[in-house]
Amino acid sequence: MAYILKRSKYFLCSQRILNYYKKVDFWIIFAIIAIFVYIFGLLAHPFELSYETAFSYPLKGNIKNCVAALANKQTVDCRIINSYDYKFLIDNKLKCDTQTPIKLVLIIKSAIDHVDRRAAIRESWGHENRFSDVTIKRLFILGVDEENQSSDLIQNEQNKYGDIIQANFLDTYYNNTIKTMVGFSWAAQHCPNGQFYVFSDDDMFVSIKNILKFIRNPTEYPEYLEKSNNSAVSNFINKGLNYELPENVLFLSGFVHQSAPHRHQCSKWYVSLKEYPYDFWPPYPSAGSYIVSREALKLMHYASFFTQHFRFDDIYLGLLAKKLGIEPFHCPKFLMFEAPYDAKNFKYVLAAHGFHSQEMTKIWLEQKMLGNA
Ligand SMILES: *[C@@H]1O[C@H](CO)[C@@H](O)[C@H](O)[C@H]1NC(C)=O
Ligand SMILES: *[C@@H]1O[C@H](CO)[C@@H](O)[C@H](O)[C@H]1NC(C)=O
Ligand SMILES: *[C@@H]1O[C@H](CO)[C@@H](O)[C@H](O)[C@H]1NC(C)=O
């Protein structure tokens, strides 16, 4: 009897402990789920608005007339809500002061201490006299550092190479949009006579040779080059089939993404619903390397006055293009995902991410030898 009593007491007790644990388990599981839902932003998705049907980004409404008016220095009805009017410490404003038509302006986003990368680019794909019959201008765009102490070094570099633009904004990752748009602003003001503008990071391999072929006939690149082996086709081309884009073409091209905002909190690219409420981004080119025509550059610069700032520069380019009705043209020959280098597969590559300094130079020299850069 005593034994039974003891057992049932034990039984009751263990039952209680079990219940206790069940309760604790429940709360732990609940907490874990809640944390996951929060971190992975699962609650955000149902509240997203449709990009297809509801997209609108400040300034609301059609800004095209305002952009045209501002570009032609006429009075503007729309409110100017944004500006990248940072003072140029080095403005290089005579860089494009030339009578010969400028084919390409290379605007390379760099950082103050990336001296090696700039040196490598000057000696390789950024060489201004690479082709005797093509005028190319090269510029590196920089902000300022926290203590503003490197100004002498940068000024020396400018004195030696004449290819620096430096503006008075703090050079940090989340200021990339400022850097990009200061580049647009500089080009629109001080170098409006380029035919195409190649924007690039300083950790890219770029083939200027291929880019020159690409901009002649982007929609058929690189197939049209293969076709021209066929003598019938090449005769046809020589007889005047025009493989040049018109002077006033609105052209923006790169590796174009059609993607959704990251809603999980740990992402480097986390964006709240408040900042951007839609389920998709407008199509945007990877910021590492893209090409803009003169007319598109000008309109995008003026559109930035009527388009609220966004801290990711690639997204901001997409927003400007969307508001102007420019459809970014996707070309997979911009390699934006880190891929191992393979000499044979680089024949038609326009730009490839993740190469700098000596490694980049080595690749460039090899591709030049193969006739691809
Ligand atoms: C950096 O120095 C330049 C002159 O050397 C000055 O004009 C500029 O305002 C300074 N910028 C900052 C952010 O302190
Ligand atoms: C961006 O630059 C501005 C102007 O120099 C500065 O006030 C701001 O703190 C910078 N932002 C970031 C995120 O570094
Ligand atoms: C075209 O000619 C080049 C050399 O002249 C050659 O390397 C390439 O393979 C040819 N392409 C085709 C499709 O025949």
Image (spheres, grey):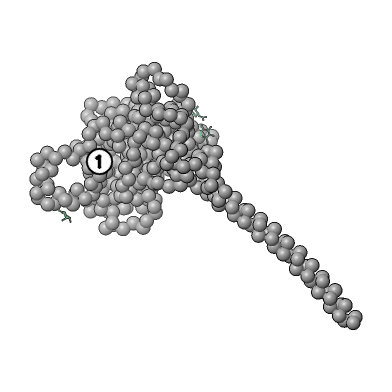
Q: Quadrant of ligand 3?
A: bottom left
Q: In the rendered view, does 307 fall on the left or right side of 107?
A: right
Q: Is residue 278 above or below residue 17?
A: above
Q: Is residue 328 above or below residue 31?
A: above
Q: Is residue 147 among the parts visible in the rendering?
A: yes
Q: Residue furthest right?
A: 2
Secondary structure beneath label 1: loop
Q: Amino acid at mark 1?
A: Ile
Residue 330 placement (x, y as % from top left)? 32, 45
The N terminus - image quarter: bottom right
Q: Which residue lies at the image location 13% right of the left edge and 43% below the top edge?
A: 237
In the foreground, 17 or 199? 17
Q: Is residue 307 above or below residue 5?
A: above
Q: Is residue 202 among the parts visible in the rendering?
A: no
Q: Residue furthest top?
A: 75
Q: In the rendered view, does 77 fall on the left or right side of 193?
A: right
**The quarter of the displayed image where residue 184 is located:** top left
Disc 1 residue crowd, few under 14, some 14–19, many 20+, Cα 10 Å = some
Residue 87 placement (x, y as % from top left)? 45, 26
In the foreground, 275 or 339? 275
Residue 262 placement (x, y as % from top left)? 50, 47
**The quarter of the displayed image where residue 189 is located:** top left
Q: Which residue lies at the image location 46% right of the left edge and 23% below the top edge?
A: 79
The residue under label 1 is: 215
Q: Which residue lies at the image location 31% right of the left edge and 53% below the top edge?
A: 363
Residue 272 placement (x, y as % from top left)? 54, 42
In the foreground, 170 or 287? 287
